[in-house]
Amino acid sequence: MSKHKVKTHNWNNGILETLDHFFDDLRSANLFANNIEAHTVKVYDPDGNLLTSKSSASASATYA
């Protein structure tokens, strides 16, 4: 069974940390994506197509 993926990106002391989180449905993926604190959050459908993306305004200041 294919899953929706939420990919999070966080900068920690100049190192990019990327994590993948998997969900059975789009509703659960979006709920998670809207409530997680990360510099960048991307939601993908089961086929790997990007559905939504959001970035934190403070992300560029953190790793610059």
Image: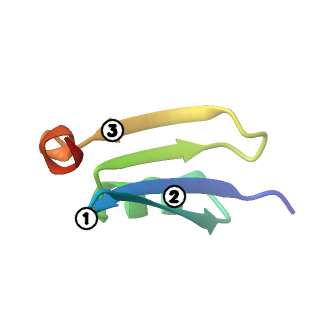
Q: Position of residue 48 (x, y in %)?
A: 72, 40
Q: In this figure, which residue is indicated by the disc labeled 2?
A: 29
Sequence order check: which comes first, mark 2 or mark 3? Answer: 2
Q: In this figure, which residue is indicated by the disc labeled 1?
A: 13
Neighbour tally class for label 2: few under 14, some 14-19, many 20 plus, Cα within 10 Å: many
Disc number lying in front (1 or 3): 1
Residue at screen point 62% across, 55% down: 5
Disc tally is 3
Residue at screen point 51% across, 58% down: 29
Query: Looking at the picture, which amino acid does disc 2 mark?
Result: Ala
Sequence order check: which comes first, mark 2 or mark 1? Answer: 1
Neighbour tally class for label 3: few under 14, some 14-19, many 20 plus, Cα within 10 Å: some
- Say the numbered circle drawn on residue 54: 3
Query: Looking at the picture, which amino acid does disc 3 mark?
Result: Lys
Could you give the CA–CA distance between mark 2 and mark 3, rounded to whole angstroms? 14 Å
Front-most of residues 12 and 8: 12
Front-most of residues 19 and 2: 19
Could you give the CA–CA distance between mark 1 and mark 3, rounded to whole angstroms? 21 Å
Q: Is residue 43 left or right of residue 60?
A: right
Question: If the image is split into quadrants, where does the C terminus sit?
Answer: top left
Q: Contact (CB < 8 A) between labels 2 and 1?
A: no
Query: Looking at the picture, which amino acid does disc 1 mark?
Result: Asn
